[in-house]
Image: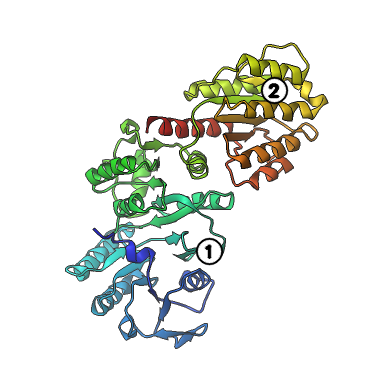
């Protein structure tokens, strides 16, 4: 069955109802953002106040456009939208995207407006995305429909992560990780879900060949049976589903009613939902970290893990976290212990976690050489490398070496910058160039690695 979203993500024509020459307002920015996108279809403007805007003709109504229209994007006051929907029915458009608010989230009057729209649309084939939606981004071809003042489609980084969020703010907070190197396919935020809902978006991403990982930031779920059926389908397709539920307490469940107009008084108790393809996270930081792991490394190399550091207390602390999150630390071979002892020049019992001691301060080649023999041994799939604090050029030297080994892609590196004072040091800039994940919170890093390894191990 063809997805409702197919002509939304790949339209040949878009009409913007409410287009304005005031580019400081939402209605004006939708046109500007679409124009600067990599959208190659036809753009039509609809506003009887104008004959043209920025050289693009403006039509009095949708029905005055002779060509077929795939998407009618509506951004006008809510009390005038029913008239536009009547025109869309007369024109037989394929999809309507309503960015305007003022519907069920605004109480009884808004609920009545949504009911009126449903009556107008009854018996038609028109799909509705929204109302009260911030739009959507299409990373595959670098375009989107958005009223954001910071929408830069030509900078979009394509990847393998699809995202569905209830509301725009948290969705965009995750999308900002695009600047760090986390690549996306699509972002959907269907607003009040008058027609197209979260499950429709979920099903689209499951069936989309370019999407390998799916993020859900969800306030409430309708069609619960369908949702769990789709969740299992994602698992069978080997697509991890990363899930951040919001609206988990009585106060926040009440707030949902005034955000997207839905009631969540009988919310699914997500804490007891367990499924092998379902990765529940507790923060945006963790959500991005796990998604970035899947986007960067796919199915990974294996679960043989080692902690590599020169700081004893740090190694013990990270070992605690590995035990807490069920990451097994593989023992060092006798051959590897001997090689490291010769490099460091001390008679010490080395183990995993590996503490090279502060002897490496005197000669940073001992640090990089030890990392090389650890890496070249082939004994480990994942190397956790903490940067506890700055020591002269130690962090920079180590980062350069990690960057070199990262690009060989024979194992996964987990660099963790733990200092509570330095966030913009040269070492981080060196590793940011790789576009591979780097971390600034040790708990997030280890928990993300654990989720990533656990999913890949049970497939």
Q: Is residue 265 left or right of residue 181?
A: left
Residue, x 66% and y 43% (percent of image)? Answer: 431
Whether residue 258 is visible, yes or no, is: no
The front one of 190 and 41 is 41
Q: Is residue 42 left or right of residue 338?
A: left
x and y percentages locating residue 200 in the rendered image:
29, 54
The front one of 148 and 4 is 4
Q: Quadrant of residue 192?
A: bottom left
In the picture as drawn, the residue positioned furthest to the right comes out as 362
Residue, x 41% and y 33% (percent of image)? Answer: 455
Q: Quadrant of the C terminus?
A: top left
Which numbered disc, 1 or 2, marks the residue that appears first in the sequence? 1
The front one of 304 and 432 is 304
Q: Which mark is residue 229?
A: none
Q: Quadrant of the N terminus?
A: bottom left
x and y percentages locating residue 321 in the rendered image:
54, 24
Q: Which mark is residue 153?
A: 1
Which residue, given by chain and number where applicable, does mark 2 sit on? 311
Q: How packed is label 1: few (under 14 Cα within 10 Å), some, or many (20 or more)?
A: many
In the picture as drawn, the residue positioned furthest to the left comes out as 123
Q: Is residue 281 left or right of residue 79?
A: right
Circle count: 2
What colouring style does the render use? rainbow
């Amino acid at each position: 069955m063809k997805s409702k979203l197919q002509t939304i993500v790949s339209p040949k024509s878009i009409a913007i109802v409410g287009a304005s020459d005031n580019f400081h307002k939402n209605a004006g920015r939708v046109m500007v953002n679409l124009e600067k996108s990599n959208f190659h279809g036809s753009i039509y403007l609809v506003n009887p106040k104008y004959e043209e805007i920025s050289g693009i003709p403006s039509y009095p109504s949708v029905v005055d456009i002779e060509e077929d229209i795939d998407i009618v994007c509506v951004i006008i006051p809510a009390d005038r939208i029913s008239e536009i929907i009547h025109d869309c029915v007369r024109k037989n458009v394929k999809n309507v995207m309503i960015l305007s608010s003022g519907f069920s989230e605004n109480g009884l009057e808004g609920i009545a407006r949504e009911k009126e729209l449903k009556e107008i649309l009854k018996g038609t084939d028109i799909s509705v995305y929204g109302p009260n939606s911030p739009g959507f981004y299409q990373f595959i071809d670098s375009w989107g429909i958005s009223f954001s003042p910071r929408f830069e489609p030509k900078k979009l980084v394509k990847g393998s992560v699809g995202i569905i969020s209830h509301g725009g703010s948290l969705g965009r907070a995750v999308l900002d990780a695009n600047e760090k190197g986390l690549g996306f396919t699509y972002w959907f935020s269907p607003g009040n879900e008058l027609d197209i809902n979260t499950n429709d978006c979920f099903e689209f991403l499951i069936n989309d060949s370019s999407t390998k990982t799916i993020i859900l930031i969800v306030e409430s779920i309708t069609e619960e049976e369908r949702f769990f059926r789709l969740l299992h389908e994602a698992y069978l397709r080997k697509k991890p589903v990363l899930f951040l539920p919001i609206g988990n307490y009585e106060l926040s469940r009440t707030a949902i009613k005034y955000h997207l107009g839905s009631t969540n008084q009988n919310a699914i108790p997500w804490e007891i939902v367990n499924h092998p393809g379902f990765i529940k996270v507790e923060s945006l930081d963790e959500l991005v970290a796990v998604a970035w792991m899947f986007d960067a490394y796919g199915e990974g190399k294996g679960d043989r893990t080692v902690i590599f550091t020169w700081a004893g207390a740090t190694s013990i602390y990270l070992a605690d976290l590995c035990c807490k999150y069920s990451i097994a630390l593989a023992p060092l071979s006798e051959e590897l212990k001997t090689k490291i002892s010769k490099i460091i020049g001390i008679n010490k019992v080395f183990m995993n976690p590996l503490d090279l001691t502060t002897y490496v301060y005197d000669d940073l080649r001992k640090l990089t050489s030890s990392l090389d023999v650890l890496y070249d041994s082939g004994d480990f799939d994942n190397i956790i490398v903490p940067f506890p604090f700055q020591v002269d050029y130690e962090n920079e030297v180590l980062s350069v070496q990690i960057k070199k080994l990262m690009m060989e892609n024979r194992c996964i590196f987990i660099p963790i910058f733990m200092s509570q004072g330095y966030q913009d040091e040269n070492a981080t800039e060196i590793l940011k160039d790789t576009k591979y994940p780097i971390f600034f919170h040790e708990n997030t890093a280890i928990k993300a690695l654990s989720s990533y390894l656990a999913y890949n191990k049970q497939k």
